[in-house]
Amino acid sequence: MDASPGPVPPADFVWPGGQRAALSLSFDDARPSQLDHGIPILDRHGLRGTFYVSLGNLRDRIDEWRAAAATGHEMGNHTLSHPCSGNFPFNRDNALEKWTLERIEDDIDEAQELLEDLLGRRPRTFAYPCGQMYVGRGESVQSYVPVVARRFVVGRNAFDEMHNDPGFCDLAQIYSMDADQGRLDRLIGLVEAAKRDGGWLVLMMHEVRPDSGRQTISAEVLDGLCRYLSGPAAEVWVDTVEAVGDYVRATRGGW
Ligand SMILES: [Zn+2]
């Protein structure tokens, strides 16, 4: 007999406070522009973000990152050495194709220790660098999703195509959508689509700058999105990946 829990019918899933959808704003790599422009915008609108931090960037401005964590922003694990496919020329020397499950476990665990030392709190969610979830090549490829599932409430993927169904999604590989270079009307459209389905939308961003550009959301677009989200008409629960993940898991009875 299959003892694994089945999906909860969507009609049974209710977001807190009668909200129609959930939204998490996530930012990768601890880019300095997130401190300079991103966090001040979130703070101005009273919203909390999730930051999947790279250790080098974190150490460079550790006091400011600690201050952000102290005000409720989530700091998540993004590995120690940010391994991705060697198909990216910049990453040929750190290619997942050459990694093993043991190596990715050690890398993630070392990042956990360092982040706990630096921030005083152990991260509870994870973001896959480059959205890639495997080690090895060809017939010897192995997924490292189980490594993440054993350690974290949520594993966040990248460059996906829709929001998550909270009654069904695998919390170890939740979808996130790329909001870099996003236009405000498109991003609001994604939120509206999540509201129609009662979904959990996760947006992924990198740089936050006055001007738009590669891997950048413009400060103006982020500010406009936050203004829309923090208004009473939005009917969206905006919170960290950790907070929404905990809620989804608890509401589903622990899976
Ligand atoms: Zn990254």
Image (cartoon, rainbow, N blue to C red):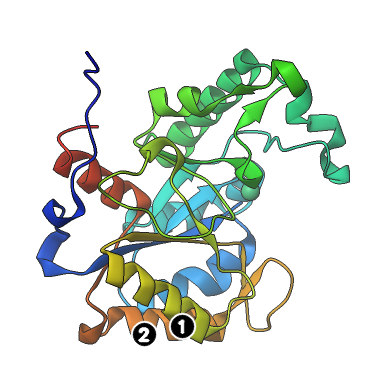
> CB atoms at circles 1 and 2 under 8 Å apart?
yes
Ligand 1 within 8 Å of disc 1? The answer is no
Residue carrying label 1 = 223
Q: Amino acid at mark 2?
A: Arg
- Amino acid at dot 1: Asp
> Secondary structure under badge 1?
helix
Tell me the residue at 17%/60% (across/down): 15
Near-viewer residue (79 or 44): 79
Q: At x 43% / y 33%, what residue is drawn?
A: 116
Q: Compared with residue 73, is residue 233 higher up or lower down, i.e. above or below?
A: below
| C-alpha separation, residue under disc 1 versus residue under disc 2 | 6 Å
Q: Secondary structure at mark 2?
A: helix
Q: Residue at x 21, y 47 (%)?
A: 247
**Quarter of the image holding residue 79?**
top right
156 vs 160, nearest the viewer: 160
Measured from the top left, where is residue 25 in percent x and y? Answer: 43, 63
Q: Quadrant of the C terminus?
A: top left
CA neighbours of label 2 inside 10 A, class few (<14), some (14 to 19), many (20+): some
Q: Is residue 123 visible?
A: no
Estimate the x, y position of residue 221 in percent, counting from the top left: 53, 83
Above-or-below relation of 72 to 135: below
Q: Is residue 121 left or right of residue 255?
A: right
Residue highlighted by disc 2: 227
